């Protein structure tokens, strides 16, 4: 466990507020909302987030791993659990007692899951994924050669109970979503026709995640999968979103160095004047992107300060010359608010060169988590 006071603060009031707005936007039950809790609730902690879903009566949650599904059941959730990626045959078999609805990723995957169903004598609920939007992974493409025969084989597979028809958009762009949605509707109609009226009854179509559901209302269909917006990190124009995470540490040392000295590995930063350099006990070994070195910023004393070194495994260096009172034990914020100052996900993305979720999801699973509301 990382020392030095480093932690992730999870603002449950922010998640509760975001969820309330999502449910209101979706119309209170139609479409059905699946709250995505994959990757340990995007690093916020299923144990902190699921009780809010239970209190709000959310009917379905999305996961990726069996351990997540098991924890959700142990915490008292009796609703639907949808896996939002294709499971291996072994995973699907292990998940049967947990009543997980599986993501069905193509004909070969269908044959594998049908084999599991036959071996255990049980039916597996599935959501057939289509490549209508062009993501081109773990999905059936009805434009590929032999696709009609593959679809017929999936429909005829014993032991597979088709509960849904799914897709995922590769871009958060309204025009791209609308084009993909049109193709998905047409492809889903072909699947429903192949299933026949009896089996097609009650099958849910779903392709919208947070951006599409909030920006392109016609994409909502019968079910929506909402992840990023719960945590205040959707790129949709939804001003009610509140970030639910702060990444916090403390200053360990502050030292003064003369002009001309270099800071950190590879001598990437040279001091132009006498400078006060503070160290923070976090580094790339703790999940901090090394790309932040020389590009990122932190908050100290309510002021923005630069991260100046090339990040060591367990420390980073910040220039606190402009915060004269800064000293050991003072709070350092790498994501979130400190007083009137803020480092949001957009700032983190710009500095790191990767989406904010790639950073905070990992950090939330490495650093100790502390609920703050």
Image (tube, rainbow, N blue to C red):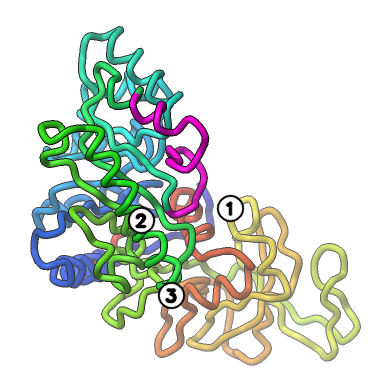
Counting from the top left corner in percent of width and height, residue 305 is at: 61, 83
- Identify the residue shown where x is 42% and y is 57%: 169
- The reply to whether the C-beta atoms of the residues labelled 1 and 2 are less than 8 Å apart is no
Residue 241, x across and y down, in percent? 30, 76
Q: Earlier in the sequence, mark 3 or mark 1?
A: 1
Residue at screen point 21% across, 58% down: 221
Instruction: Kindly report the distance in space between the C-alpha atoms of the residues bearing marks 3 and 1.
Output: 18 Å
Left or right of 332? Residue 156 is: left
What residue sits right under mark 1 in the picture? 286
First-in-chain label (3 vs 2)? 2
How many marks overall? 3
Describe residue 183's horizontal placement relative to residue 360 as left or right. left
286 drawn magenta: no
Q: Secondary structure at mark 3?
A: strand
Q: Are marks 3 and 2 in contact (CB under 8 Å)?
A: no
Task: Mark 3 and mark 1 in contact? Answer it, CB < 8 Å.
Answer: no
On the image, the x and y values in percent for residue 179 come to 41, 64
**Secondary structure predominantly adopted by residues drawn in magenta:** loop
Q: Which residue is mark 2?
A: 44
Q: Check residue 299 in the rendering and tell me which mark sits there, or answer none.
A: none
Based on the picture, tell me whether residue 143 belongs to the magenta stretch. yes
Q: Which of the numbered marks, if any, corresponds to residue 336?
A: 3
Which region is colored magenta?
Answer: 133-152
Task: Describe the element under mark 2 as helix, strand or loop.
Answer: loop
Q: Residue at x 51, y 76 (%)?
A: 346
Name the residue at 34% across, 47% down: 187
Nearer-the-camera pick, 85 or 351: 85
Quadrant including the C terminus:
bottom left
Q: Position of residue 4 (x, y in %)?
A: 53, 59
């Amino acid at each position: 466990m990382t020392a030095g006071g480093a932690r992730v603060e999870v603002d449950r009031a922010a998640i509760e507020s975001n969820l309330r707005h999502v449910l209101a936007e979706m119309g209170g039950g139609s479409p059905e909302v699946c709250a995505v809790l994959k990757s340990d609730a995007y690093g916020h902690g299923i144990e902190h987030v699921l009780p809010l879903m239970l209190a709000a009566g959310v009917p379905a949650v999305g996961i990726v791993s069996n351990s997540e599904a098991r924890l959700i059941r142990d915490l008292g959730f009796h609703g639907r659990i949808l896996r939002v990626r294709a499971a291996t045959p072994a995973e699907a078999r292990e998940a049967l007692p947990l009543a997980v609805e599986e993501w069905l990723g193509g004909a070969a995957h269908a044959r594998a899951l049908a084999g599991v169903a036959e071996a255990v004598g049980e039916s597996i609920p599935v959501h057939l994924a289509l490549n209508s939007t062009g993501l081109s992974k773990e999905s059936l493409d009805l434009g590929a050669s032999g696709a009609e025969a593959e679809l017929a084989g999936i429909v005829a597979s014993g032991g597979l109970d088709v509960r849904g028809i799914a897709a995922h958009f590769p871009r958060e762009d309204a025009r791209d979503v609308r084009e993909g949605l049109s193709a998905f509707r047409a492809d889903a109609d072909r699947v429903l026709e192949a299933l026949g009226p009896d089996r097609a009854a009650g099958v849910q179509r779903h392709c919208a995640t947070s951006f599409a559901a909030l920006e392109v209302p016609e994409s909502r269909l019968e079910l929506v999968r909402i992840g990023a917006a719960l945590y205040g990190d959707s790129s949709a124009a939804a001003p009610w979103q509140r970030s639910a995470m702060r990444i916090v540490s403390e200053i360990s040392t502050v030292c003064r160095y003369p002009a001309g000295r270099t800071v950190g590995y590879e001598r990437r930063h040279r001091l132009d004047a006498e400078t006060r350099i503070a160290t923070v006990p976090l580094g790339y070994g703790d999940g901090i992107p090394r790309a932040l070195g020389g590009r990122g910023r932190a908050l100290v004393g309510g002021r923005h300060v630069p991260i100046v070194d090339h990040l060591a495994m367990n420390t980073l260096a910040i220039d606190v010359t402009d915060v004269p009172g800064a000293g050991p034990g003072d709070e350092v914020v790498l994501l979130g608010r400190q007083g009137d100052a803020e480092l949001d996900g957009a700032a983190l993305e710009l500095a790191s060169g990767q989406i904010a979720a790639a950073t905070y999801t990992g950090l939330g699973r490495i650093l100790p988590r502390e609920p703050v509301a």
